[in-house]
Image: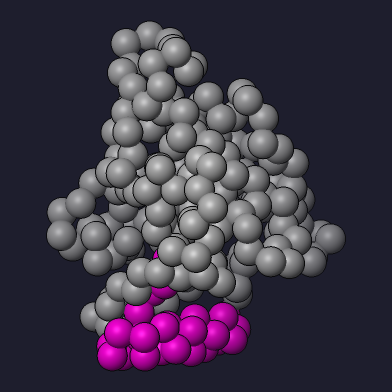
Amino acid sequence: MAKLAARGVEIVYVTLTDGRLGTYDSKVRPEELAEERRKEQEEAARILGVKDLVWLGVRDGELQPTVEIRWKLVGLIRKFRPDLIMTPDPWLTYEAHPDHRYTGILASEAAFFAPLPHAASRGDLQPHTVRYVAYYWTRRPNTFVDVSDYVEVKLKAVGAHKSQFGEAPAIKDLLKAYMRLMGKRIAADYAEAFKVLSLSHLHCSVFAEDI
């Protein structure tokens, strides 16, 4: 995100759920945690250079791949007209968090339907074709981006999510280790890894998994 923002790319964050369940502390009220999570996301976005944030406000842990939410995302795609959508890989093996899986599914479905004029046709928003969907948290990356100059700003943004990670350095150490490992794929110090597909790969493509 920081690398894209530095290039002047317009970035829009769409956050589907409110994070109210993400604590092991029974004394923290879910509503208070949701508000804190929002503030932390805003601060992390500021650090990375992201200015536009959209909140759908689905209760944490209750996201479902519904037609209603799919159409909302189609509307956002048509409003902001992105070239690229970045989303969790919903086909990550053993991913137990339904919000992660369903976010990836919904984003993929919305990208697929957004160009179709009779899909969720409302108002003056025109169909839009997303060129690529980039899946992160993936076991089958096909694209590696050198982020060696942006590691520290990434870790600073991660640190803004205090209610999730606290002051423990473990998550930062893990992220750096992973980025170093991915960097070896392109002879860089650090890299981010994505599975990047076009819309043609998201419909009846027997080759998409192997690309």
Measured along the vertical axis of the image, is residue 34 above or below residue 169?
Answer: above
- x, y (%) of residue 195? 44, 63
Task: Return the residue found at the far front.
Answer: 206
The image quarter containing residue 62 is: top right
Quadrant in which the N terminus is drawn: bottom left
Quadrant in which the C terminus is drawn: bottom left
- x, y (%) of residue 181? 44, 89
Magenta segment includes 49? no
Going 69% across and 40% down the picture, which residue do you hit? Answer: 63
How many numbered markers are drawn?
0
Please state which of residues 208 and 116 is positioned toward the viewer in this rendering.
208
Q: Locate residue 71 relative to residue 97 in the image: left or right.
A: left
Measured along the vertical axis of the image, is residue 93 above or below residue 54?
Answer: below
The image quarter containing residue 90 is: bottom right
- x, y (%) of residue 142? 40, 69
Task: Return the residue found at the far right.
Answer: 26
Q: Is residue 153 visible?
A: no
Magenta segment includes 169? yes
- x, y (%) of residue 29? 76, 50
Q: Locate residue 160 relative to residue 192 in the image: left or right.
A: right
Q: Which residues are magenta?
A: 167-194
Q: Is residue 175 visible?
A: yes
Please state which of residues 129 and 37 is positioned toward the viewer in this rendering.
129
Measured along the vertical axis of the image, is residue 134 above or below residue 151?
Answer: above
Task: Return the residue found at the far top.
Answer: 123
Going 59% across and 29% down the picture, which residue do you hit? Answer: 69
Please state which of residues 208 and 20 is positioned toward the viewer in this rendering.
208
